[in-house]
Image (cartoon, grey):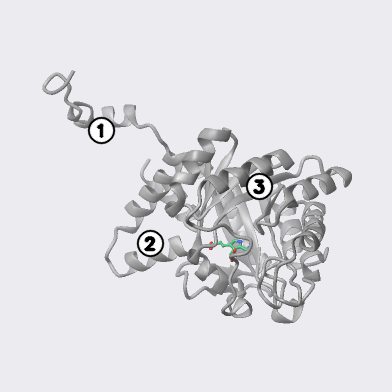
């Protein structure tokens, strides 16, 4: 029955009834912190296009892990910054058992065994051209050869102790190939978080600065493998295939401009669904906050709540530790 019988403002009048009818919550336990890892000792180097974000050496990474652990953030996602001399056409550094990512995983699992460690499976930090895969003479990223390289990379991460490997490369068939290799290698507990719906987004710009692949990629783009931002049915096909091939979790990326995809994916498949609030989303919020144009805390929590409301079970966000602190303060 309509007004005046129904007055929706009745429930909004007091904090207690607003709390009781709140549909979506946001907790530290829903967040994953991406971290840029670099070589060196005791270094934390600022990323200019992501104020507040640093590239840290492994010893400093352990301090970040201690904070995450203390604040109740369940997992870290590692992104190695490869020194230029370790990059090559065949990206072999990606599966070096003693590579930066592999050493970082071992250090973390030794000191913080209960903290989840997620590794990125893609070749862009390791290729001289900055593409996620291996290229032919024409510069085209060749699918099946790349998949073989990704399998080696994923297995080396599992051997180092990674809990979750997260292929973010968008090659066809890589989830099935990685799953088969993990099973054969006895890594039956290693989870796969498939970046199933990864869009060819301009919002990755600051990330490419952070890992130092922007210069390598130059004017290149990733349109032949990452998805067209205009598409949504195609995302569901990608997700269906990845699940069929053995993915345990799926990812939508970026997050805020793609909430419809998050919603459709969660509705259709009902599987653990994550969203990545990417570097450009972070940079927008941070820049506006630094100019005094937005209330950072309120806007970040609103954006993350919106991503959760759309259907994401967990969110990768560079704000994870800040948010965990803010939520604790507001208790
Ligand atoms: C690379 C990768 C990218 C991001 C995560 N893994 C960039 C890209 O595809 O060019 C972007 C994350 C971000 O922007 O925060 N495989």
Q: Residue at 34% of width from left, 58% of height from top?
A: 296
Circle on res. 15: 1
Q: Nearer the viewer, mark 2 or mark 1?
A: 2
Q: Nearer the viewer, mark 2 or mark 3?
A: 3
Q: In 3D space, how far apart are the residues under numbered discs 2 and 1 (Cα atoms)?
A: 27 Å
Q: Position of residue 19 (x, y in %)?
A: 32, 31
Q: Is residue 67 visible?
A: no
Where is residue 264? Give x, y as percent.
49, 39
Beta carbon of the mark 2 residue lies under 8 A of ligand 1:
no
Residue 141 location, x and y as percent? 71, 67
Q: Earlier in the sequence, mark 3 or mark 1?
A: 1
Q: Is 41 placed above or below 191 here?
A: below
Q: From the Cβ of disc 3, is ligand 1 less than 8 Å away?
A: no
Circle 1 crowding by C-alpha within 10 Å: few under 14, some 14–19, many from 20: few
155 displayed left or right of 260: right
Label 2 to label 3, Cα distance in Å? 26 Å
Q: Can residue 161 be seen in the rendering of this structure?
A: yes
At a point 38% along the width and 62% down the height, the residue shown is 285
On the image, the x and y values in percent for residue 173 come to 74, 50
Asked if 232 appears above or below 125 in the picture, the reply is above
Q: CA distance from mark 3 to mark 1?
A: 38 Å
Nearest to N terminus: mark 2 or mark 1: 1
Whether label 2 touches label 1, CB < 8 Å: no
The label nearer to you, 3 versus 1, is 3
Residue at 35%, 32% in the rendered image: 22
Q: Which residue is mark 3?
A: 193
Q: Which residue is mark 2?
A: 285
Q: Which SS class for mark 1?
A: helix
């Amino acid at each position: 029955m309509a007004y005046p019988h129904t007055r929706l403002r009745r429930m909004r009048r007091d904090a207690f009834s607003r709390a009781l009818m709140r549909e979506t919550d946001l907790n530290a336990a829903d967040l994953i912190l991406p971290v840029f890892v670099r070589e060196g000792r005791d270094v934390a180097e600022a990323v200019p296009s992501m104020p507040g974000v640093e590239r840290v050496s492994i010893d400093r990474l352990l301090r970040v892990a201690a904070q995450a652990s203390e604040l109740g953030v369940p997992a870290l996602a590692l992104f190695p910054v490869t020194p230029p001399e370790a990059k090559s056409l065949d990206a072999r550094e990606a599966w070096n058992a003693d590579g930066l990512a592999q050493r970082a995983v071992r250090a973390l699992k030794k000191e913080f065994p209960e903290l989840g460690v997620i590794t990125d499976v893609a070749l862009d930090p390791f290729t001289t051209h900055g593409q996620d895969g291996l290229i032919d003479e024409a510069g085209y990223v060749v699918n099946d050869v790349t998949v073989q390289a990704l399998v080696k990379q994923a297995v080396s991460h599992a051997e180092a102790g990674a809990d979750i490997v997260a292929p973010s490369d968008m090659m066809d068939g890589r989830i099935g190939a990685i799953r088969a290799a993990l099973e054969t290698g006895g890594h039956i507990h290693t989870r796969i978080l498939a970046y199933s719906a990864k869009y060819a987004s301009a919002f990755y710009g600051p990330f490419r600065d952070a890992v130092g692949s922007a210069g390598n990629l130059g004017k290149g783009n990733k349109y032949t493998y990452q998805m067209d931002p205009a598409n949504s049915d195609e995302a569901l096909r990608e997700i269906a295939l990845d699940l069929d091939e053995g993915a345990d979790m799926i990812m939508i990326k970026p997050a805020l401009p793609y909430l419809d995809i998050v919603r459709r994916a969660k509705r259709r498949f009902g599987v653990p669904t994550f969203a990545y609030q990417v570097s450009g989303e972070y940079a927008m919020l941070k820049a506006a906050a630094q100019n005094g144009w937005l209330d950072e805390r309120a806007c970040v929590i609103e954006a993350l709540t919106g991503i959760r409301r759309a259907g994401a079970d967990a969110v990768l966000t560079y704000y994870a530790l800040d948010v965990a602190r803010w939520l604790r303060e507001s208790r």
